[in-house]
Image: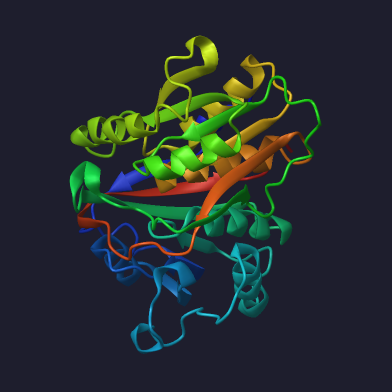
Amino acid sequence: MLDYTICYREYFSISDSFLAARSYDFFWAALTDDERSRALYDKVGASTKQWLVLPEYGYNASDIPTGSHAPVGVADEAEFIRGLIDSSGLTPSSRICIDITGLLAPYLLFLLRALVSHGIVNIEIVYAEPGQYLQSEETKFSGEDVRTVRQVYGFEGSHIADTAKDILILGAGYDHQLLKMVATAKEGARAIQLFGLPALRPDMYQQNILRANRAADALGRGAGAHQDNFLVPAHDPFTTASFLSSLAEEYDFTNLYLCPLATKAQVLGFGIFYITECVGKAVSILYPFCGTFPRRTSVGIGRIWIYTAELDLTS
């Protein structure tokens, strides 16, 4: 088990001068209509700043800022990110900051893998918490047009045919329909849910539980030892990664499937754990791929987090 909690993280408010005093070669952020994404983009200093215009958000060409990375007709997260990296001119010494606030999980994960493959293993990442979600526990974070449940590119495992002790670990978010989809795709696996506590806001833990309960049947609730629930901080990727590491040691599994559907900070934790400990093993990250996502899910801005992701902890 690795202790990822030694990695650096700090929080501050949007009015602090912390970010403005820092300088990067590249800064990337996903374009959304949330105030918390737009405000951070203006604060960060970088030689190259680019909006990443994800096709799932459905922006019209007239709404896209000049200089954005907005390729037309990309097939998946891998093609989108490869195009970004290939056109950037980055080197192993490049100083990179990524705002993950609006970055959909598959793009965030593949971007981590792509940067590591280019020799960049220390990455600064910022994340802005919401003031509150638009419709409390009824807020929709994805469309209902799920196209497929598949492995995220770059996070495919070397799985074995024996499925007797398969385990599915879910970062449980508000999207109960997505939880159902993944649980159904791996219905024979033992389901483990990670809930965010402390939550980003005091009421969000209860909202999360209310939504996740709607997926109870698909997750095997009431089936005795078939399901386990655990708590990890919603804002801390390093505690999430350490907890996943401990679970991987504790449980005897044939194949392990990970599915991060909660906060972007937790998605980052899943990615860090996989890259440092799971490559080449019978472990995959699964995701239910939707065709559309809402551009706005929150109002206001909470704490701003900065994380230093160290992806060479095993060296």
Q: Residue at x 68, y 69 (%)?
A: 91
Which residue in the rendered view is the most extreme toward the top?
224
Q: Is residue 73 above or below residue 239?
A: below
Q: Residue at x 64, y 79 (%)?
A: 87
Residue 309 vs residue 184, the one in the foreground: 184
Quarter of the picture holding the N terminus: top right
Q: Residue at x 40, y 74 (%)?
A: 58
Q: Residue at x 47, y 30 (%)?
A: 218
Residue 176 vs residue 34, the one in the foreground: 176
Residue 84 vs residue 174, the one in the foreground: 174
Q: Is residue 66 visible?
A: yes
Position in image of residue 142 (x %, y %): 38, 55
Task: Classify residue 258 as left or right of residue 140.
Answer: right
Q: Is residue 54 visible?
A: no
Position in image of residue 103 (x %, y %): 45, 59
Task: Classify residue 243 as left or right of residue 222.
Answer: right
Position in image of residue 198 (x %, y %): 30, 29
Task: Classify residue 5 as left or right of residue 187.
Answer: left
Q: Is residue 7 above or below residue 38?
A: above
Quarter of the picture holding the C terminus: top right
Q: Indicate the quadrant where residue 92 lies.
A: bottom right
Q: Indicate the quadrant where residue 209 lies.
A: top left
Residue 16 vs residue 235, the one in the foreground: 235
